[in-house]
Image (tube, rainbow, N blue to C red):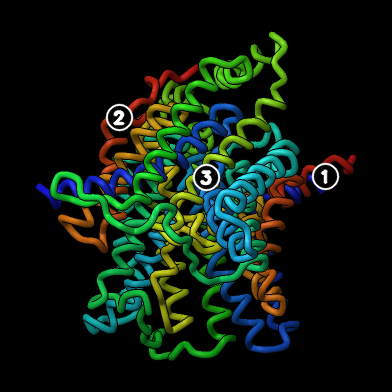
Amino acid sequence: MKAILRSRLTPLLALALVMALVPMIAPTSFHLRVAALVWIFSLAALGLTILMGYAGQVSLGHAGFLGIGAYAVAIGPARLGLDPLLCLLLGAVLSGLVAWLVGRPILRLKGYYLAIATLGFGVIVALILHSETELTGGPDGMSVARVTLFGWRVTGALNWYWVSAGALLVGALLALNIAASPTGRALRALHDSEVAATGAGIDVSAKKLAAFVLAAVYAAVAGGLLAAMNGLITPEAASFSHSVELVAMVIIGGLGSVFGTVLGAAFLVVLPQALTAFQEYEQAVLGLLIMVFMIFLPQGIVPSLRALIEERLP
Amino acid sequence: MSEFLQLAFSGLTVGAIYALIALGFTLIYNASDVINFAQGDFVMIGGMGTVFLMAAGLALPVAALIAVIAAVLVGLLLHRLAIEPARGASPVTLIMITIGASIFIKGVSQILFDKQFHSLPAFSGDTPIPVGGATILPQSLWVMGTALALVVALYLFLEHTLVGKAVLATAANRLAAKLVGINVALVLALAFGLSAAMGALAGVVATPITLTRYDIGTLFTLKGFAAAMLGGMGNPVGAVVGGLLIGLIETFAAGYLSSTYKDAVAFLMILVVLLFMPRGLFGSRAVERV
């Protein structure tokens, strides 16, 4: 039993099982859409899981990378006549490149100083998307062209459900493999002590930068999918509160746990939808729940539960 | 020249507000190592509370006093109900708790108050005072005067009273402070209460200029946090200088460069400063314990 709990493939299989079950029990296409949103935000948060959970580096501006990916898919086809799928890739490359350029200097900062630097980056990206009205449509955002995948027009909630689920599975597999790779071990080592990691021969700044770039690519792909599925994107996607939401997903589920990240994303995507009936109280309840979860499960949902189960097992 | 002076006046006014918020960050951080992302919401409580109490018929000083007391209560509750039970949690977890608190405060405020922008009448009229070719609004003097008075009062409190010295001792070394008989729990509560009071007072004097709404706290939190980091987290002088600098930078950027990108300029400056001084302007030199 403990071996199953610790196996690398368990979270992946559990995730695939949930993905297969949801369409059978989801009553309407609205529910499928929400589920697809969960997969997309999980993908974005997974990148942060690598950066924060494995490498221990905080980013409070990650929605900026999500915005870059989203606007690449919006601007490319509309202004340059490029294929949306190509733009998704270009957005990921661009986001990775920006992360590489920005990350090189700012990853030298530590703790709260890194937090304010990434936060500043996110604010600047959001401001550019907000203000360059001719390119981005300004605060009202812009509409996104429909995606054609090898001649197949991706429309409808069910199709988007499977596309986003597939993307998340690939992302999760990659994240789990990285965790078990020498790079993953190097990241966890520098998480615990940079000095010790350097002493063990790990190129700390290169590994940190790799995690940052990877996290930016995850966010950009998720942003591109989000824009394409919604058919509309606004600068809100890159806002500070969105960055905070991504961080909250990672922490509520359990820092460093892939399945926990999906759980955290599900929590923060589904909850506001479930609370729309009590629209006035939505924010208050959301804030209260975040506090309660963090106070009573400071390790996050999945690690706390796992510890509880392992304790009970012989 | 007069344009320069004009911009400097408004920059200092905004900067004084940021400085007070940054000082609030510093107080709480020094006492408890927590970065309180609900700091800006104290500003909102001060402003909105005063607006609604005045609408209920109270005079400005009474309304402001009650609003500040309300903010202090919120600060104390935040410490007692959210921070204290999570003692020993990781810094990221603590940040998330205060972010949750900030969302909660906004949520409750939009139910308790409303979702509109509100303002207060200027305390001593709207007649601009001419100074060296430029003009300054009386309310700006109120803001800067309040900030100055609070900074001086805080300095006197920390350096010249027994309780203040207990706060400083706790900030320097919590365990050692406990050993010499300082009631650390009381000091922590005091830090949260004082921070809330300073934020709320800033909110009261700033509202005639900046307006207020239930969600305006986020902006103040961002700027206050940025100011505290620019100065060097944990350094009160740094917090004040950082706040004034950010106020000046964004006002001059808005005046001479572009008003759309004033926030970008401010954050870009912080990035540049941190690259050369990774612990902020007044931060202590980084020494990592191995």
Please, which chain is the residue tagged with disc 3 on? Answer: B
**Disc 2 element:** loop
Q: Are marks 2 and 1 on the same chain?
A: no
Q: Tell me which residue sits at (57%, 33%) in the image.
A: B28
Establish if B123 lies above or below B170. below
Query: Most extreme residue toward the left, as rendered?
Result: B1
Look at discs 1 and 3 and give the one toward the viewer. 3
Q: Residue A308 got which mark? A: 1
Q: Quadrant of residue A217?
A: bottom left
Depth check, front residue: B185 or A267: B185
Observer-side mark, 2 or 3, equals 3
Q: Where is mark 3, residue-wise?
A: B201
Q: Mark 2 lies on which chain?
A: B
Q: Left or right: B122 with respect to A167?
A: left
For this rendering, which residue is in front, B62 or B112?
B62
Mark 1 and mark 3, same subunit? no
Q: Is mark 1 on a helix, strand or loop?
A: helix
Q: Which mark is residue B277?
A: 2
Q: Position of residue A142 (x, y in %)?
A: 35, 81
> Circles 1 and 3: CB distance less than 8 Å?
no
Q: Which residue lies furthest to the top in this view?
A: B180
For the residues labelled 2 and 1, the Cα–Cα distance comes to: 44 Å
| x then y, percent, for residue B169 | 58, 16
**Structural distance between the alpha carbons of marks 2 and 3:** 32 Å
Q: Residue at x 51, y 64 (%)?
A: B213
